[in-house]
Amino acid sequence: MQAILTVTVPFFALVLTGWLAARRGLLPESAIPGLNAYVLYFALPCLLLRFGADTPVLDLLNPWLLAVYLLCAVLVVVFTLALSLNRGVGLKDAAFAALVAAFPNTGFMGVPLLVALLGPAAAGPVICMVLVDLFFTSSLCIALSQLQGAGEHGARTAALRALRGALSNPLPWSIALGALLSAGGIRLMGPVDSVTHMLADSASPVALFSIGAMLRRAAVHAHGRTPLRDTLPVALIKLLLHPLLVFAAGSAAQRLGAPLSAFQLMVLTLAAALPSASNVSLLTERYGADSGRVARIIMTSTVLAFGSFSALAWWFGARAAA
């Protein structure tokens, strides 16, 4: 456990540092969008490009990993949607609760954390998850959120808008470029390689700091207070049910003969156990849903994930050593 905490404590401490900096006013609210833009358009694409170029293409686009994770994303969305609707939550807010339950923070936190914990081989499975969530999970939940009032036409328009947003996101393109470099055996050279490495090395600390700042910003702009009894169930779905489903589905696929290694299943399960993606709060604001509720779910999952993720990583380590 000590070896695991040596990795996880600094990651979550950086999130807390960002939150405290925003709370104390050391990081002005006006600076947060610029910080996010640096991570999204410069540092993180370089990190994904570097890992993509060093990872075999079939590890980046593993069909079995994609199928297992896609199935579990659908199950989590359906279950969370039904739970929220049963509690009297409107369809729009229920859809974003489903998104926050099914969308782990794989981009800003997952890639650097799991690579630091498990080595560069962990990058491939995590990148598979990034692609599923950017193109499928987000589009599905945004479309569901627009069924209420806007109808089927509005849902289709929202889904297409979400897909266009995913295509304008630099992360899939950096993954694609990395895959092309990997397939062609091409290596970046000279100053281009040096600049890419410098930007990639900054991705992890700045992204984690940015998560904390975004959570603080979302909490400040939230209207009203959402009781813990309304946020905790969704946070627990994210941290407990989601990884349990991924592990069960992956284990079943292995028994059916799928070429899914124990290491890949471990990475997939640990990535599913990450806290909710912080950028969902921005999507919630854009589509007019209850951003306060979503922000508190993200905050709850982030606080609890330090213990739950570390415990799950320890369990996998103990199990592998047994």
Image (spheres, helix red, strand yellow):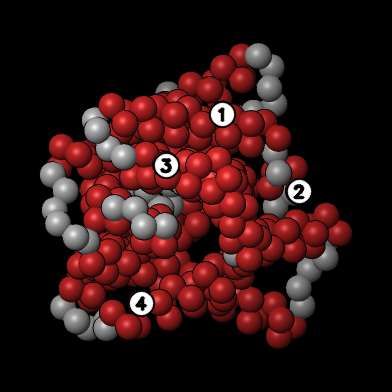
In the image, what residue occupies the spot 52% across and 70% down? 40
User: Between marks 2 and 4, how big is the CA–CA gap?
Assistant: 35 Å
Q: Earlier in the sequence, mark 3 or mark 1?
A: 1
Is label 3 in contact with label 1 (beta carbons under 8 Å)? no
Q: Is residue 148 visible?
A: yes
Read off the residue under disc 4.
32
Q: Mark 1 or mark 4, which is nearer the start of the sequence?
A: 4
**Quick one: SS at disc 3?**
helix
Residue located at (42% from left, 67% from top): 207
Q: Residue furthest right?
A: 184
- Of the two numbered discs 3 and 2 in the rendering, the one whose residue sits closer to the viewer: 3
Left or right for 127, reference 5: right
Which of marks 4 and 2 precedes in the sequence?
Answer: 4
What element does badge 2 sit on?
helix
Number of residues whose C-alpha sits closer than 10 Å to that of mark 1, classed few (under 14), some (14–19) or many (20 or more): few
Q: Which circle's residue, 4 or 3, is located before the other in the chain?
A: 4
